[in-house]
Image: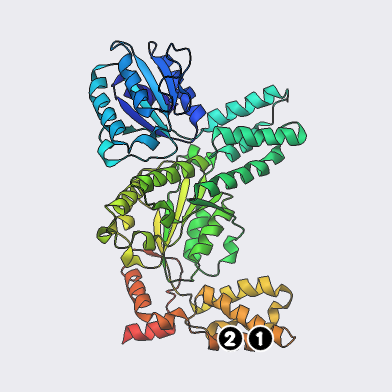
């Protein structure tokens, strides 16, 4: 386990104060105890506020309800005694001036002694004056081998014969991203329901995963039912995606292909960027996680960075998956001028470093409406596999968009609609605006106790002013940027509305 290797290195290097943010208290304590045994000569102590120091100690209960006394216990141990002392929930006391001062004093003392203080906390919450003496070490969620071993242990405990390898692999993959405690809990629920563990328990696990992700308040487990065929137009983008459909398979690894990194979709609002993110997850049969970047930013110092690391850890534990980041331009717009003591810059730095260096199969789909608001680092090659510009649909693409929606709404009556006329008469409309036109046309028909017609759709179009007319300058800037050749076009045709084409020629 990589954590044990990193932790043992810190012990041998005599890092005096180690801070481990994790909600898996029982599991991390077992890992720490294992490392203490591995190094051979280290005593292991655990303290918490209610019970003080625990175990076979002459001083059992010492430091109960007294965090300063808990630190003084370190000085009671002989200087030559090697020890690892775990302090549960000690982050709650770090703002106390006497506790902070004592920790800084111990940091000096323990440099010459084989002792290490380990603070366990559910999140990173380190005061500024302790940031130099505390070393943060991440504790990862259970990996595949740990989950498989736990599943096999439970199968043995229930005297159940081994599952088919395919079913076992499916259950292991479904459990990724959950803490070991949650895995045990949901599998116990499965055993209590029908006496054993079955392939159908994947649904129970996925529901537990949704619950776990919701509780983080950072990521949403997003249902993806949209198909690639639901996207009208965007042929270049769809071809690019279809070529990479098998890139997450074992056959692709044997071929030598790296995992696809992700896409940045830039363009006009309502042109299908979000729909594309959902369609990718559905087409590739991968879970879709939606990140609201605004949720990363919290009021406490260090908490935003902690949430960013938690988001990355969770996404990688759930891999292979699609991570959808909607309107990323709004989160990092004007990053240099934000007066938040550098929090936005640090979150952004952590995020783009991960984008560039990640090796896990997390396919990131970021969407942006305003390319000028994005920091230049975001557009640098290596962050994403490709940057696509999604412009206003061409006439042919509008025909496809009408066909997609009408096939869903009136599949039995599609031939009665003049798709060519509809496409010709709506030159400035985006895909989202076309959908709104159809809804308005349905209201017209429904209010008159009849089905809606082509004329109703055109009447609805005449009542809606598209964004292309109300935000001409912004859209022109986007079109000009796309024309510079720095980005691939999602459509085979330019996708310029006749109005904007005419203006650009003047």
Check the picture and name the quadrant holding the C terminus.
Answer: bottom left
Above or below: residue 404 compared with residue 24: below
User: In this view of the protein, can residue 134 be seen by the observer?
Assistant: no
Residue located beneath label 2 in the image: 460
Residue at figure coordinates x 67%, y 32% from the top left: 188
Q: Position of residue 190 (x, y in %)?
A: 70, 36
Q: Residue furthest right?
A: 194
Eyeballing the image, is 119 above or below 38?
A: below
The percent coordinates of residue 252 (x first, y second) are 50, 42
Looking at the image, do the residues carrying marks 1 and 2 touch, with CB atoms under 8 Å apart? Answer: yes
Which numbered tag is attached to residue 444?
1
On screen, residue 155 above or below 318: above
Place of residue 489 in the rendered image (x, y in percent of width and height, measured from the top left): 41, 67
Q: Residue pushed farthest front?
A: 65
Determine the CA span between mark 1 and mark 2: 8 Å
* Residue at 59 percent of width and 56 percent of height: 224
Determine the image quadrant of residue 183: top right
Colouring used for the render? rainbow
- Image mark for residue 23: none
Looking at this view, is 195 or 416 the one in front? Answer: 195
Is 176 above or below relative to 471?
above
Q: Quadrant of the N terminus?
A: top left
N-term-proximal mark, 1 vs 2: 1
Query: In the rendering, at what x and y percent does residue 346 appear?
Result: 30, 49
Q: Secondary structure at mark 2?
A: helix
Element assignment for label 1:
helix
* Residue 130 horizontal side relative to residue 270, left or right: left
Residue in the image at 50% along x and 56% along y: 241
Q: From the viewer's side, name the closer residue of 365 and 195.
A: 195
């Amino acid at each position: 386990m990589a954590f044990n290797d990193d932790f043992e290195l810190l012990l041998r290097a005599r890092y005096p104060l180690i801070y481990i943010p994790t909600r898996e208290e029982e599991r991390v304590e077992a890992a720490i105890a294992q490392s203490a045994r591995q190094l051979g000569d280290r005593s292991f102590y655990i303290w918490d506020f209610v019970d003080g120091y625990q175990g076979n100690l002459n001083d059992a209960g010492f430091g109960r309800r007294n965090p300063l006394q808990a630190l003084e216990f370190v000085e009671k141990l002989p200087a030559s005694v090697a020890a690892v002392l775990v302090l549960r929930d000690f982050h709650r006391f770090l703002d106390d001036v006497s506790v902070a001062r004592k920790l800084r004093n111990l940091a000096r003392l323990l440099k010459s002694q084989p002792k290490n203080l380990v603070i366990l906390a559910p999140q990173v919450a380190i005061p500024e004056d302790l940031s130099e003496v505390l070393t943060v070490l991440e504790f990862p969620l259970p990996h595949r081998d740990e989950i498989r071993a736990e599943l096999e242990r439970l199968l043995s405990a229930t005297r159940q014969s081994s599952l088919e390898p395919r079913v076992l692999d499916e259950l292991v993959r479904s459990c990724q991203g959950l803490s070991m405690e949650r895995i045990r809990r949901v599998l116990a629920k499965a055993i209590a329901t029908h006496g054993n563990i079955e392939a159908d328990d994947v649904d129970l696990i996925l529901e537990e995963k949704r619950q776990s992700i919701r509780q983080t308040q950072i990521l949403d487990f997003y249902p993806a039912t949209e198909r690639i065929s639901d996207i009208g137009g965007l042929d270049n983008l769809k071809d690019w995606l279809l070529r990479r459909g098998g890139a997450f398979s074992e056959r692709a690894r044997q071929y030598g292909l790296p995992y696809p990194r992700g896409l940045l979709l830039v363009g006009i609002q309502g042109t299908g960027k979000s729909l594309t993110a959902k369609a990718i997850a559905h087409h590739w049969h991968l879970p879709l996680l939606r990140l609201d970047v605004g949720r990363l930013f919290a009021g406490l110092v260090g908490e935003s960075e902690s949430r960013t690391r938690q988001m990355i850890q969770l996404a990688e534990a759930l891999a292979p998956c699609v991570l959808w980041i909607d309107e990323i331009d709004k989160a990092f717009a004007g990053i240099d001028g934000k007066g938040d003591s550098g929090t936005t810059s640090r979150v952004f730095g952590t995020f783009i470093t991960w984008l560039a260096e990640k090796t896990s199969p997390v396919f990131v789909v970021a969407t942006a409406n305003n390319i000028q608001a994005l920091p230049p680092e975001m557009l640098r090659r290596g962050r994403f596999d490709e940057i696509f510009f999604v412009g206003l649909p061409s006439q042919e693409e509008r025909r496809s968009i009408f066909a997609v929606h009408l096939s869903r709404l009136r599949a039995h009556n599609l031939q009665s609609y003049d798709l060519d006329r509809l496409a010709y008469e709506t030159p400035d409309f985006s895909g989202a605006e076309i959908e709104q036109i159809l809804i308005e046309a349905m209201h017209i028909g429904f209010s008159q106790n009849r089905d809606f017609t082509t004329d109703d759709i055109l009447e609805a179009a005449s009542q809606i002013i598209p964004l292309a007319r109300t935000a001409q300058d912004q859209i022109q800037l986007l079109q000009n940027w796309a024309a510079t050749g720095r980005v691939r076009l999602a459509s085979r045709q330019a996708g310029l509305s006749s109005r904007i084409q005419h203006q650009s020629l003047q």
